[in-house]
Image (spheres, rainbow, N blue to C red):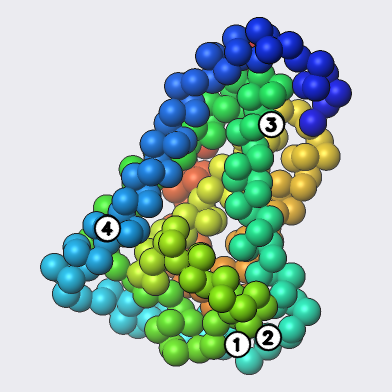
Amino acid sequence: MPKKVYKTSITEFYSIFKEHFLYILIIFGVVILHLIEVNIIDSVVTAWIGYDFTYNIQNIEGDIVSQFSQYWSPVIVYFFVIMYIAVYPFTLWFSPIYFIGNNQKNAMKTLAYGTLLIYVITLPFYLFFPITNVYTFYNLESTLNNAIPAVENLFYLTTTHNNCLPSLHVAMSILLARSVHLTRNKRLSYFLYFCMASVIISVIYLAIHWIIDVICGAIIAIVIIFILDYFIKDE
């Protein structure tokens, strides 16, 4: 955070907070909706559908992702697990705090509206097109639990084993990198681009997402970014 942030008075901060309140509301609304979908709605709809579409994905791309399990190295696995489980969530919540603290309206708008649009597009897939993650489908060991024991229990409070297509991690990491880029903070931008690349590689290397999940997540994020860039002009 720049030093000026710590010198902001309560009155100034309240004024800035009011300007960003709608965007904060949108982000928290999406989070709450997602938690409801994961913990209440998803299991009911999945049981109603009664079909696992993972076999269709496997028929298209084969066992490419599962083959990475043969090349798991403890050091590399631990690095990607930390990026996936710890660093990515940190950037997800630190970024809007940074935008508000620095009154970065365009960045906050891009993140808020982008998050909403990404979730509106991905939700029908999660509900009506269940795809099981790779390591569960192939009954591989969980790299998440191997690196950080019992972390998977916490992780699956915010997702399910069959909310894979498209990859929300990939889509959001791209959106985050773009949003931070709008602040013109080079160091933070480089860090977010590094995190974005790490997340995209990690979901494949750790055998979490299928390649199709990653491609679809990236396409959705890029299309939404182009749309938002058109409607959100520099102030």
Q: Are marks 1 and 4 in contact (CB under 8 Å)?
A: no
Looking at the rendered structure, the secondary structure element under dot 4 is helix
Name the residue tied to disc 4.
40
Relative depth, front residue between 6 and 64? 6
- The image shows residue 38 at horizontal and vertical percentages of 34, 58
N-terminal of the two: label 4 or label 2? 4
N-terminal of the two: label 3 or label 1? 1
Name the residue tied to disc 3.
98
Q: Is residue 217 visible?
A: no
Q: Residues within 10 Å of mark 1 (few under 14, many from 20)?
A: some
N-terminal of the two: label 4 or label 3? 4
Alpha carbon distance from label 3 to label 2 = 35 Å
Name the residue tied to disc 2.
72
Question: Hey, what amino acid is under mark 4?
Answer: Ile
Q: Are marks 3 and 2 in contact (CB under 8 Å)?
A: no
Which mark is nearer the camera, 4 or 2?
4
